[in-house]
Amino acid sequence: MVPFESPTGMSREEYAPWGGMRFNEPSLKVEYADGTRAIEWVFEEHGLERSRASQMLWLRFRDRGYPLTVTLYYRIHDGHDVIERWVRLENSGGSGPVTIEQALSADWRPPRRERYRLTYLYGRWGKETQVAQVVLGPGKVVLESRRGATSHQCNPWIALDPEGSATEESGEVWSAALVWSGSWKIVMETTPYGEVHCAGGVNDFDFHYRLDERTQLELPAFVGLYSNKGFGGVSRSWHVYEREQVLPEAPDAVRPVLYNSWEATGFTVNERNQMELAEKAAELGVELFVVDDGWFGARNNDRTGLGDWTVNSEKFPRGLNPLIARVNALGMRFGLWVEPEMVNADSDLYRAHPEWVYHFRDRSRTEGRNQLVLNLAREDVREWVLVTLDILLSEQNIEFIKWDMNRSFGEPGWPDEIGRNPERVWLEHVRNLYGIIDELRRRHPQVAFEACCGGGGRVDLGILARAEQVWTSDNTDALDRLRIQEGFSYAYAPRVMMCWVTDCPNFVTKRTVPLSYRFHVAMAGALGIGGDLSRWTPLEREEARGFIATYKRVRSTIQNGLLYRLRSPRAGGVAAAQYVARDGNEVVVFAWGQSQQFGETEVLLPLCDLEQEAHYADTMSGATYSGAYLAQKGLAMNLVGDFDSRMIHLVRTASAR
Ligand code: GLA
């Protein structure tokens, strides 16, 4: 062996505890109380557990000189090509606390190939889940969030395909996603020996987690799957896994059509304007009416009132109950916006408890959107949030909570805990967030949750285990949305992807597109309306009623079917997507044009996953096609001019003779 080579660096370690001749990204690095900073582990035992529809393997190791045990877990579910991996650390006591400097959840090692291409999702506010692809060369690519939340900037999901060979519907792809809504890190490293490994978990930046004697630390799962059916195959596997194993609702549940008044009334919500909007929303066929920001405290703008969760008596002199009763009488459920992890400096809560926010001694308390972050790791804050929301949900018939989070952490300090591991906030904030939502769900099982973080800053498998849906982006411009929604669909199911139809010109892009186009884009996920209905003309309302009725007929196929991305919006021109019901009996196709060029050849969309021998009838035109025709020749969408769009709904009829 050449002395500068590392035998451990050349081997394919399943989980690499730092120590000895290891120079690649480790999975685990600790410091023991006596100053030793290396792990030497030995295998102890393993177990295999089978429950109704899943199997779990665990492997236990211990440090040969210190009371630290490391248990690696692997779980698979029948019918899914998914492996869930996570780790539990335990300090069984006798040698003082162990400082955990880095503890990732799993290290995935795809088979050795010439070169891998990495696909990931990046963005910013208003431009979430954009698809990026890079070829991995020697060295590391690090994707991460250091913001305390999942982030808009990068989503904890990746896909790797060898030699960039995968296409939308063919080729091998390995994919992985973290079940975590706090700061995270995924490292793709190509070693000098040509091995690619992908280690991920909670971000070690500023981590220093102290594992006291006789305590355990369970890390979030890093889930992986494989498909030989390209990126489309990978996405469909994630969608099915999410519906069947992750989401709190039944796999075949459908999300209601919602109305949210944020873009219509902003902070000037009051009983009268909400009642008016509710009447109009109900006429359109809306099923869930949501009052957004502005209903509480002195919340007349984003500088005041956040944290004071009592109904504003000027806006709602009789409280929320008369509005809720009216909404219910109109046949809709009622939902409410909250942002419980935050506080404005100008609020009664902050005046009473300035020590409740993250801060460092003698450092500025940086504000983002004029707000500070509550230290949810504190027991008193956790309890206060739980009790406040419990009261809110007990005193009113609220059936939906939009849980927002409108800034990243700055100064994540906890001065009272200096010397007692204040850095644990990175973990404890998220765990307490999960704990609060879980407890609220237990006490109020009728309440569904939407996770929001200034749009799509908190979209991950961890929050999806306790939120029926997520707010995809504050950017509701239909053309921009095509790309945001396409990227989103790489990792997450259409059912959880909230999409609103809003007014034009769009408040973000100033673009104006037809109402039909806005509907067709928003119908590609879970449909909502966010426009100011008091300004919609009778004709627009009539059109909207038609789209909502159509959507209700096809939504189970869209929300719970198999998605085929037929044409990417990133390619320009016509974008298209197809959804096939799980039983194959219904097919929904959307095509969204942008701008037609004179003399352009007509776009035909060959469809996927059809029974060649069967016939499919277009429920609107009555035309019938054979599966073979649709697969080979394709469906003509006849788009003309600018921002034209179509939805076609096909129903399988008898098989061809
Ligand atoms: C965030 C959300 C919006 C809206 C506002 C309210 O930006 O993403 O949908 O709820 O907060 O302040």
Image (tube, grey):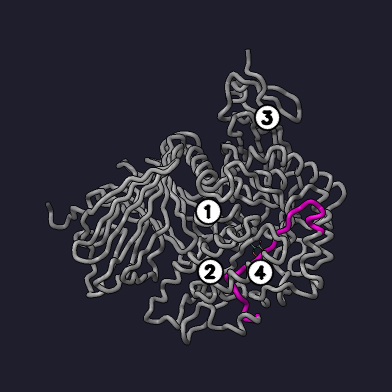
Q: Which residues are magenta?
A: 326-347
- The residue tagged 4 is 391
Q: Position of residue 516 (x, y in %)?
A: 75, 44
The answer to whether residue 118 shows anywhere in this view is no
Q: Earlier in the sequence, mark 1 or mark 3?
A: 1
Q: Secondary structure at mark 3?
A: strand
Residue at 73% in and 69% down? 295
Q: Quadrant of residue 36?
A: bottom left
Element under disc 1 = loop
Q: In front: mark 2 or mark 4?
A: 4
User: Residue 528's mark?
Assistant: none
Circle 1: residue type: Ala
**Which badge, 4 or 3, comes first in the chain's sequence?**
4
Residue 408 numbered mark, or none:
2
Q: Nearer the viewer, mark 2 or mark 1?
A: 1
Label 4 vs 1, first from the N-terminus: 4
| Nearer mark to the viewer, of 1 and 3 | 1
Of residue 373 and residue 330, the one placed in the foreground of this image is: 330
